[in-house]
């Protein structure tokens, strides 16, 4: 080819050689490799990058494209899809990418009524006949009459949030399911979890407010489902088992579980006692496994306890909470922790939680915490020696006793490492851990009187993990207005 170099540069051999090499490489490159925006012919390997560039990855379409032809079609449709974003048609197009056909998008659904005394609840008025301009319902069926699964519905929610007008709210998704040629079933199966307590559009008729015209409510169908969508399976199982109806407590549990999982601490927990609710029945459940059984480490309360929204308060004389957690059976000799959130400042004696002894020796297998007893702090984790420190520590706070190896037991109060005691992990108790006292070979001793607002048992936590756990628990207590 003719040189494109200026005449004065053509005399330089090395520059000329560089030009010729580049020209040869360009000549040998198939032209289709360079035409990356020819979606029909571009190399398949380029498609994920084009999908990212055109913002159609994941639930926006590319996730559901199983063939090369389908992937090319999603990318080709991207510009039209985003040009219409925020319109009804963009929702229809985006849902079609995940094999969901929109039969109709119905706007102005739901109703908003001001309870000002105009109407009596006597059957003369039909509530539900008023539409709200901001709410819309999506009517779906599946392409090719295939099954619509829970994953598609979850993805549909994300797509609708992405492509709907910002000023509008999803009221519900109603699905038409074809059973055979003559039978259809329609069911409203899910609500968008954008509609919550803090939302001016939402309201639950729970007796908290008087219908006197001071507030405007919108009656959201099946509001309980909308609340349930806020929580994962573990949170929801606990909330259901413990009968937690207070929204603040429900949200606090949801955030607690999410934070523990995000930080990798959830997997290390064998038992978590959040002490939410106001009754022994609510306080007894283990968040990790909220079954009402001993193997699930459900607490069995005995003696004098006071249960309230701030926690469970032992009376200091005969109160115990049996966790049914036996370290020798359920724990690990060199990896073990217990924790206790005390809301009480009291130095008159008594243990907060623990177990002491094996069948053969009362001094073996010590695992306990005494936050303050006559000016002394005591702790132990799977060893024959208890550690005593003659320092008056405020017993109000979050205490974590942990062992992650064979030689060291660490004691934390809140975010502070109090003590790092050297002692071999040489024995482990075969008696269950008690709250509000220590289980000494099957007998409760050292009854405490410090209110428990949170407690855990599980694998050993490193110093960094102990500090992270403290942060999570302090956020949890703050959300319930009971931190100290």
Image (cartoon, rainbow, N blue to C red):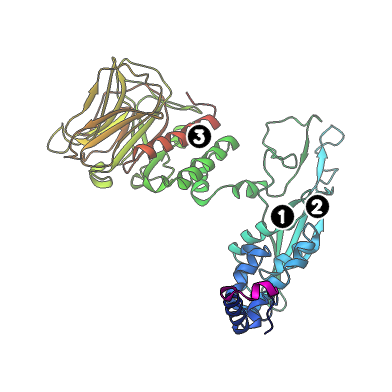
Is label 3 in a helix, a strand or a loop? helix
At x 74% / y 29%, what residue is drawn?
A: 210
**From the viewer's perspective, is 224 left or right of 262?**
right
Q: Secondary structure at mark 2?
A: loop
Q: Note whether 87 is above or below 41 in the view shown.
A: above
Residue under pointer 3: 476
Upstream in sequence: badge 2 or badge 3: 2
User: Could you tell me if residue 152 is visible in this image?
Assistant: yes
State the extent of the magenta-drawn residues as a range: 5-15
The quadrant holding residue 356 is top left
Q: Residue at x 27, y 23 (%)?
A: 446
Name the mark on residue 172.
1
Q: Main secondary structure of the magenta part?
A: helix
Read off the residue under disc 2.
Answer: 109
Does residue 470 show up magenta in the picture? no
Q: Are marks 2 and 1 in contact (CB under 8 Å)?
A: yes
Q: Quadrant of residue 273?
A: top left
Position of residue 128 in the picture relative to residue 349 (left or right): right
């Amino acid at each position: 080819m003719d040189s494109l170099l200026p005449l004065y540069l053509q005399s330089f051999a090395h520059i000329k050689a560089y030009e010729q090499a580049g020209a040869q490489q360009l000549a040998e490159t198939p032209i289709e490799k360079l035409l990356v925006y020819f979606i029909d012919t571009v190399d398949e390997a380029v498609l994920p990058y084009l999908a990212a560039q055109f913002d159609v990855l994941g639930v926006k379409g590319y996730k559901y494209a199983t063939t090369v032809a389908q992937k090319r079609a999603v990318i080709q449709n991207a510009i039209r899809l985003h040009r219409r974003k925020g319109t009804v048609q963009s929702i229809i197009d985006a849902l079609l990418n995940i094999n969901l056909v929109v039969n109709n998008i119905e706007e102005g659904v739901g109703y908003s009524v001001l309870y000002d005394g105009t109407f009596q609840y006597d059957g003369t008025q039909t509530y539900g006949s008023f539409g709200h301009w901001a709410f819309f319902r999506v009517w779906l069926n599946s392409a090719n009459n295939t099954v619509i699964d829970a994953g598609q519905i979850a993805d549909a929610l994300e797509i609708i949030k992405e492509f709907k007008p910002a000023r509008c709210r999803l009221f519900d998704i109603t699905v038409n399911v074809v059973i055979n040629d003559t039978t259809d079933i329609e069911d409203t199966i899910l609500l968008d979890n954008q509609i919550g307590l803090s939302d001016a559009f939402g309201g639950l008729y729970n007796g908290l407010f008087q219908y006197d015209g001071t507030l405007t409510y919108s009656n959201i169908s099946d509001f309980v489902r909308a609340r349930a969508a806020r929580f994962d399976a573990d949170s929801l199982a606990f909330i259901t088992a413990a009968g937690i109806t207070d929204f603040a407590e429900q949200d606090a549990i949801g955030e607690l579980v999410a934070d523990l999982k995000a930080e990798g601490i959830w997997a290390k927990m064998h038992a978590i006692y959040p002490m939410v609710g106001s009754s022994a029945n609510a306080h007894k459940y283990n968040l990790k496994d909220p079954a009402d059984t001993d193997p699930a480490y459900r607490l069995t309360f005995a003696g004098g306890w006071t249960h309230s929204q701030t926690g469970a308060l032992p009376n200091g004389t005969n109160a115990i909470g049996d966790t049914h957690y036996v370290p020798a059976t359920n724990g690990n000799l060199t990896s073990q922790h217990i924790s206790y959130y005390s809301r009480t400042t009291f130095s008159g004696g008594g243990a907060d939680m623990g177990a002491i002894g094996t069948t053969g020796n009362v001094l073996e297998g010590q695992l306990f915490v005494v936050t303050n007893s006559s000016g002394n702090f005591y702790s132990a984790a799977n060893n024959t020696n208890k550690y005593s420190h003659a320092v008056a520590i405020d017993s109000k706070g979050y205490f974590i006793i942990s062992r992650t190896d064979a030689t060291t037991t660490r004691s934390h109060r809140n975010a502070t490492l109090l003590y790092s005691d050297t002692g071999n992990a040489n024995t482990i108790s075969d008696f269950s851990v008690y709250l509000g006292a220590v289980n000494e070979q099957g007998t409760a001793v050292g009854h405490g009187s410090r209110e428990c607002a949170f407690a855990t048992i599980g694998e050993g936590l490193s110093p960094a993990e102990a500090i992270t756990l403290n942060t999570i628990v302090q956020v949890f207590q703050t959300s319930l207005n009971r931190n100290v």
